Image: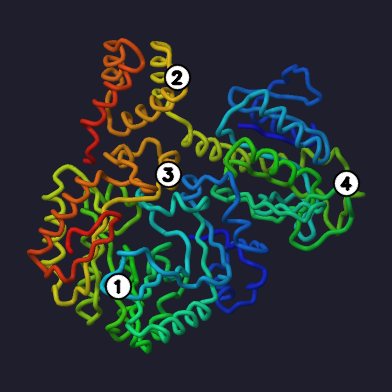
């Protein structure tokens, strides 16, 4: 329930702003000159703000889509990410957003048309299919009822045959997709950790079973899906837990409808990690066997490779290695 | 919990509610204290407010203390006697704004507060007016997280009954009806502050371990980190004390403690 809506004065009459005001008539409306006045001040505490985030409506200025980090793709050569929102409905303890932002408030950029213009231009400039990843700085679908993101972007991407859209999510809010005809170049990619891990460090996230159920519904309507085993969390009974997870997924979902599977072990810029560790000093996850590698915090190289290889070997029982992609800071064990 | 009002009349109902007693201090500000609540009366205006907040923090320094400003204000469109929580505060002098994050389930409606230099009979709709708010936020945010710094204003004047017609004797009767809701807000703020503070068990163990050896600054940092990890993993206090008692010095203790942690770091 959104109780406070901050909005940039320049977009007070934007149709998307007005639509959100209408959907939340009880929310207090607070004008600001620029969203950063509310989002960026020093002295905010992400942890207590996460208990009750407010919504900030803003206009994105430039940098609508940016290149993704090297090795984060799923087969494409031209890859961008774009963020119509900042911050997420869920509260995953490993999430880098807690370290990147000082506020847990949701920022929604209402000027979707500018994002689209940029996407169309980049697509036309790309000789090969261009990939656009949504869901790096937010969950693509979790707050769709507020953002109406999918109802705007889906019809446009269905016409952009030389591009792919990835909707990365842990949400089971798939109604907007089920209402439309399946679009082969839109991949809904679900992130997973084993259920026992999820219960401990992914607050508010739908259960593994309900996410599998959502995937099942999507695939039965012809939508391609992706699996994102990211972050891989080292844990006791590692092989059993990940084996059960994959068994559960592949016994419900046809391999043919899985576009890609990407794997990445827990990793984070060390400045973010320090900030998050300070916010949650009693968090069990952060007492894990991590070490600093350059500017990142991650598992030790050997441990990371071992865990990733275990996952790859488990996945090979169900799918071909061509569908598996590694997005780690260390070299890929697949290639 | 620190509370601040500009005038004694604004403070009186709160002093009674929280059973606060006057404390004699060598300061121009009147200070009232209870078991967990402190209240300072700043006097009118931004400069007095800045000094009063700084005085109270200096007198009772703490990292995660909630701060609540309670006071009267004018308003362009609200009825006299309504209580409102400040969601944005504009300093008329500098044009700068601050946005106290709203994380509490307080039932108070929200308002934009404009902090002015002098009392005025000019009112904009949807705006409250005071002379202290901006200085309060600017100063208190140096000492506590922004979320724990809030202000509630009770409307004393408006375009129908402007400031020139306000009588100080009305102050208590304006504030008193809101005491139950103010108390709920105070309790919620205290609860949030408590969630950020280290556990008593942690503090006691840390003090105990510090007293056993002499530590360098770096070692104190390491000790705190080890202790946080130990509490996260679930290593018992007795086991940590046992390691310490069997160690010859701080270096030996931290090294053995680290080995113990490393053997138990696997996430379950």
Residue bearing the label numbered 3 = A276
Q: Chain of mark 4?
A: B
On whether disc 3 and disc 1 are found on a single subunit, the reply is yes
Point 65% across, 55% down: residue: B110
Q: Which residue is mark 4?
A: B166
Q: Nearer the viewer, mark 3 or mark 4?
A: 3
Query: Which colour scheme appears in the figure?
Result: rainbow
| Helix, strand or loop at mark 4 | loop
Question: According to the image, label 2 marks what residue?
Answer: B216
> Cα distance, mark 3 to mark 1?
29 Å
Instruction: Indicate the position of residue A57 as horizontal and vertical percent values.
Output: 57, 67
**How many other residues sit within 10 Å of disc 3, few (<14), some (14-19) or many (≥20)?**
many
Relative depth, front residue between A108 and B87 = A108
Report, in whole angstroms, how far the alpha carbon at label 1 lies from the one at label 4: 62 Å
What's the distance in space between the residues labelled 2 and 3, CA to CA?
A: 25 Å
**From mark 4 to mark 2, how far is it between C-alphas?**
60 Å
**Quadrant of the snapshot with the C terminus of chain A:** bottom left
Q: Which residue is mark 1?
A: A188
SS at mark 2?
Answer: loop
Q: Nearer the viewer, mark 1 or mark 4?
A: 1
Are labels 2 and 3 assigned to the same chain? no
């Amino acid at each position: 329930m959104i109780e406070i809506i901050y909005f940039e004065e320049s977009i007070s009459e934007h149709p998307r702003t007005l639509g959100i005001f209408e959907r939340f008539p009880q929310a207090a409306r607070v004008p600001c000159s620029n969203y950063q006045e509310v989002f960026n001040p020093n002295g905010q505490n992400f942890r207590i703000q996460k208990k009750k985030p407010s919504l900030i409506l803003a206009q994105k200025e430039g940098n609508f889509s940016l290149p993704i980090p090297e090795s984060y793709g799923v087969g494409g050569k031209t890859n961008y990410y774009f963020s119509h929102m900042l911050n997420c409905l869920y509260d995953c303890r490993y999430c880098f957003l807690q370290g990147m932002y000082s506020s847990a408030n949701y920022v929604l950029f209402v000027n979707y048309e500018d994002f689209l213009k940029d996407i169309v231009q980049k697509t036309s400039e790309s000789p090969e299919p261009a990939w656009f990843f949504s869901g790096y700085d937010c969950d693509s679908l979790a707050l769709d009822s507020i953002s109406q993101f999918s109802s705007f972007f889906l019809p446009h991407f269905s016409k952009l045959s030389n591009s792919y859209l990835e909707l990365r999510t842990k949400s089971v809010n798939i109604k907007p997709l089920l209402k439309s005809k399946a679009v082969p170049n839109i991949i809904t990619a679900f992130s997973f950790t084993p259920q026992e891990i999820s219960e401990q460090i992914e607050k508010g996230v739908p259960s593994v079973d309900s996410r599998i159920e959502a995937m099942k519904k999507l695939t039965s309507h012809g939508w391609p899906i992706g699996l994102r085993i990211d972050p891989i969390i080292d844990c006791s009974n590692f092989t059993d837990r990940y084996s059960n997870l994959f068994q559960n997924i592949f016994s419900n979902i046809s391999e043919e409808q899985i576009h890609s599977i990407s794997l990445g072990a827990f990793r984070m810029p060390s400045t973010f990690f320090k900030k998050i560790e300070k916010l949650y000093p009693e968090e069990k996850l952060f007492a894990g066997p991590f070490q600093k590698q350059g500017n990142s915090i991650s598992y030790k190289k050997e441990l990371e490779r071992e865990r990733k290889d275990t996952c790859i070997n488990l996945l090979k029982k169900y799918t071909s290695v061509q569908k598996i992609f590694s997005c780690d800071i260390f070299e890929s064990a697949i290639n | 919990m620190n509370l601040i009002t500009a005038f004694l009349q604004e403070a009186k109902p709160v002093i009674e509610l929280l059973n606060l007693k006057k404390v004699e201090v060598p300061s121009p500000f009147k200070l009232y204290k209870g078991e967990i609540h402190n209240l300072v009366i700043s006097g009118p205006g931004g400069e007095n407010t800045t000094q009063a907040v700084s005085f109270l923090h200096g007198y009772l320094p703490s990292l995660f203390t909630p701060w609540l400003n309670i006071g009267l204000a004018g308003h362009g469109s609200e009825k006299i006697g309504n209580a409102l929580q400040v969601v944005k505060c504009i300093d008329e002098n500098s044009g700068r704004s601050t946005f106290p994050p709203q994380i509490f389930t307080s039932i108070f409606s929200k308002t934009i507060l404009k902090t002015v230099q002098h009392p005025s009979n000019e009112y904009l709709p949807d705006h409250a007016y005071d002379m202290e708010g901006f200085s309060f936020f600017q100063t208190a945010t140096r000492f506590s997280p922004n979320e724990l710094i809030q202000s509630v204003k009770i409307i004393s004047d408006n375009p129908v009954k402007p400031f020139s017609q306000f009588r100080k004797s009305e102050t208590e009767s304006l504030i008193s009806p809101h005491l139950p809701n103010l108390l709920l807000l105070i309790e919620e703020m205290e609860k949030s502050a408590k969630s950020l503070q280290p556990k008593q068990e942690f503090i006691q163990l840390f003090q105990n371990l510090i007293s056993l050896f002499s530590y360098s600054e770096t070692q104190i940092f390491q000790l705190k980190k080890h202790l946080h990890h130990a509490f996260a993993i679930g290593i018992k206090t007795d086991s940590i004390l046992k390691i310490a008692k069997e160690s010859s010095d701080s270096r030996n203790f931290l090294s053995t403690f680290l080995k113990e942690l490393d053997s138990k770091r696997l996430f379950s």
